[in-house]
């Protein structure tokens, strides 16, 4: 999902108004924003499985929370969202401009880019 989000963000940013080019700092901001948006969407997906606002989770009995997040017999959609949040995020993205003059490398989590 993240590569598509980055591609869509880049395509939207490249307009006739800017001559179809972006500054290196604009690309950096776009990449950081796309990764942050994706990471935030994982949490939003989890919070959406609970009725009411995120504050309402505190008022739910443990048994109800357990039933909501352990829905494996019903297809496991909620369970999958919980696992995505519990396992964290690891991202390593590299992007090279069409002329090969600039390289962007983004990492999040326990990954590192090497030579």
Image (tube, rainbow, N blue to C red):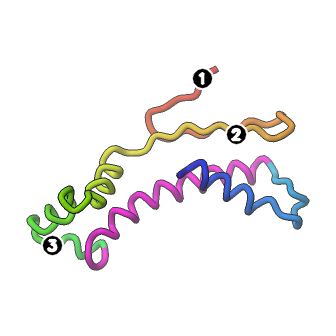
Q: Quadrant of residue 46?
A: bottom left
The residue at 60%/48% (across/down) is 3
Element under disc 2: strand
Of all residues, the one furthest to the bottom in this rendering is 52
Mark closer to the chain start, 2 or 1: 2
**Mark 3 vs mark 2: which is more N-terminal?**
3
The residue carrying mark 2 is: 95
Secondary structure beneath disc 1? loop
Instruction: Name the residue tied to disc 3.
Output: 60
Q: Which residue is mark 1?
A: 114
Task: Please provide percent x and percent y for residue 59.
Answer: 16, 75
**Residue at mark 3 to residue at mark 2: CA–CA distance:** 44 Å
Q: Is residue 45 magenta?
A: yes
In the rendered view, does 62 fall on the left or right side of 87? left
Disc 3, SS: loop
The picture places residue 97, in percent across and down from the top left corner, at 79, 41
């Amino acid at each position: 999902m993240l590569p598509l989000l980055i591609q869509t963000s880049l395509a939207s940013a490249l307009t006739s108004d800017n001559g179809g080019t972006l500054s290196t700092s604009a690309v950096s901001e776009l990449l950081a924003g796309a990764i942050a948006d994706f990471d935030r969407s994982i949490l939003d997906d989890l919070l959406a499985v609970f009725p009411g606002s995120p504050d309402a989770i505190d008022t739910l009995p443990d048994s109800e929370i357990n039933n909501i997040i352990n829905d494996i017999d019903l297809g496991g959609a909620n369970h999958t969202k919980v696992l995505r949040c519990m396992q964290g995020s690891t991202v390593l993205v590299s992007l090279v401009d069409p002329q090969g003059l600039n390289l962007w490398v983004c990492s999040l989590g326990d990954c590192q880019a090497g030579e």
